[in-house]
């Protein structure tokens, strides 16, 4: 069975879910291919994805203008509005998917119809997987397409938001989080020892993970300086992802910092799960990807809202407010040493050994 996954590199969550699903599907279900129509299509669409990521890293508050422009401009709402789809359709025909699944809001209408019309009727099944955790200002109307065969989301709150916006309830399904393999199942008893040994950490110090330096506004240096001034005894892990400039800057200041810290490049799924399961607190933006990973690992989180909040981030904070004892946010990263002296809330959901509910539903659509 061939599964075609439509994704985009806007932020990190869409790509994480697309790659996770590809990995799960090719483990016994069939072949999977990821296509990115926006990045690989008309140059204006490529520019738009770059602008999204630039706003996310530099001034998240400005994203309200960008978000609402896209909501009402509906650039990809109908197939006739889409420019430069020839190469995409050629790849679709070559792969001949039995099922198409989109993990991005702007690929659920015009692209859906283009792809459906170029495939035989029996291969036209289309699924939307929405990674948003709850309703909110940033829940895009473009997620909703009643003509899709299934709308899936990680939680009931996601599906309820979709139904309120016009998705038929009988076509919605809460399947649980769609994450990389390392986030499923339970940690072993040696997990803590492996974590401390791998990163050269002390078992007598609190470990705080800084997750703001990869896709979001980079606040690593401000937090490290704040802990230096506070004199608190702790240790920090600063996640830098593919941000080589931040990684190099932190390594240069490591010897003169009072607080022990380690700057880490992009981590594998198993490394990321190990870090989150053993962190005393994660400091990160309320993006759907990392927030969901923290939920899967039961990680306490302080949310970074410096330079404003993106509309999509409000959805995830709404979920946190409902499910956790409270939510801790700050627009001043220098306050983190003060905030971690208080109880930090967390959410944890039961994770099975695999995203079986989603995989079984997709297989059922193909065979049905």
Image (cartoon, rainbow, N blue to C red):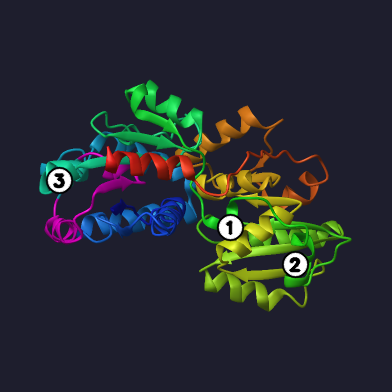
Tell me where residue 182 appears, x and y as whole percent: 58, 57
Residue 264 versus residue 205 in the image, above or below: below
Number of residues whose C-alpha sits closer than 10 Å to that of mark 1, classed few (under 14), some (14–19) or many (20 or more): some
Whether tag 2 and tag 1 are in contact, CB under 8 A, the answer is no
**In the rendered image, which residue does mark 2 sit on?**
194
Tell me where residue 36 appears, x and y as whole percent: 29, 57
Residue 187 versus residue 202 in the image, above or below: above
The segment highlighted magenta reads 83-109
Name the front one of labels 3 and 2. 2
Which image quarter: residue 144?
Answer: top left
Residue 72 versus residue 273 in the image, above or below: above
Q: What whole-number distance in Å separates the C-alpha atoms at marks 3 and 2? A: 49 Å
**In the rendered image, which residue does mark 3 sit on?**
114
In the rendered structure, which disc, 3 or 2, sits on the residue that comes first in sequence? 3
Whether tag 3 and tag 2 are in contact, CB under 8 A, the answer is no
Whether tag 3 and tag 1 are in contact, CB under 8 A, the answer is no
Picture residue at 33% right of the left edge, 57% below the top: 30
Q: Is residue 285 visible?
A: no
């Amino acid at each position: 069975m061939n599964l075609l996954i439509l994704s985009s590199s806007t932020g990190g969550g869409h790509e994480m879910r697309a790659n996770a699903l590809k990995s799960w599907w090719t483990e016994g279900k069939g072949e999977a291919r990821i296509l990115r129509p926006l990045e690989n299509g008309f140059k204006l669409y490529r520019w738009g994805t770059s602008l999204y990521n630039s706003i996310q890293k530099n001034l998240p508050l400005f994203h309200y203008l960008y978000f609402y422009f896209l909501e009402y401009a509906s650039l990809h709402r109908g197939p006739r509005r889409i420019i430069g789809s020839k190469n995409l359709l050629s790849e679709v025909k070559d792969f001949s998917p039995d099922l198409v699944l989109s993990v991005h809001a702007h690929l659920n209408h015009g692209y859906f119809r283009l792809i459906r019309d170029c495939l035989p009727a029996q291969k036209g099944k289309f699924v939307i997987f929405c990674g948003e955790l709850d309703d909110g200002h940033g829940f895009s109307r473009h997620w909703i397409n009643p003509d899709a065969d299934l709308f899936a989301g990680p939680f009931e709150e996601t599906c309820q938001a979709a139904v309120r916006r016009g998705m038929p309830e009988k076509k919605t399904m809460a399947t649980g989080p769609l994450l990389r393999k390392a986030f499923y199942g339970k940690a072993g008893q040696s997990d803590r020892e492996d974590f401390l040994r791998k990163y050269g950490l002390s078992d007598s110090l609190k470990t705080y993970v800084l997750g703001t330096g990869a896709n979001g506004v980079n606040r690593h240096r401000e937090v490290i300086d704040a802990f230096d001034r506070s004199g608190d005894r702790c240790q920090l892990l600063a996640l830098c992802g593919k941000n080589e400039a931040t990684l190099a800057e932190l390594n240069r200041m490591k010897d003169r910092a009072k607080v022990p810290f380690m700057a880490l490049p992009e981590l594998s799924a198993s490394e990321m799960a190990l870090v989150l399961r053993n962190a005393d607190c994660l400091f990160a933006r309320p993006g759907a990807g990392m927030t969901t990973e923290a939920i899967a690992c039961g990680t306490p989180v302080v949310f970074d809202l410096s330079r404003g909040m993106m509309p999509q981030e409000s959805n995830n904070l709404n979920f946190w407010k409902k499910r956790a004892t409270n939510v801790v946010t700050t627009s001043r990263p220098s306050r983190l040493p003060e905030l971690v002296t208080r109880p930090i809330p967390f959410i944890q959901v039961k994770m099975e050994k695999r995203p079986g509910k989603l995989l079984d539903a997709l297989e059922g659509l193909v065979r049905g």
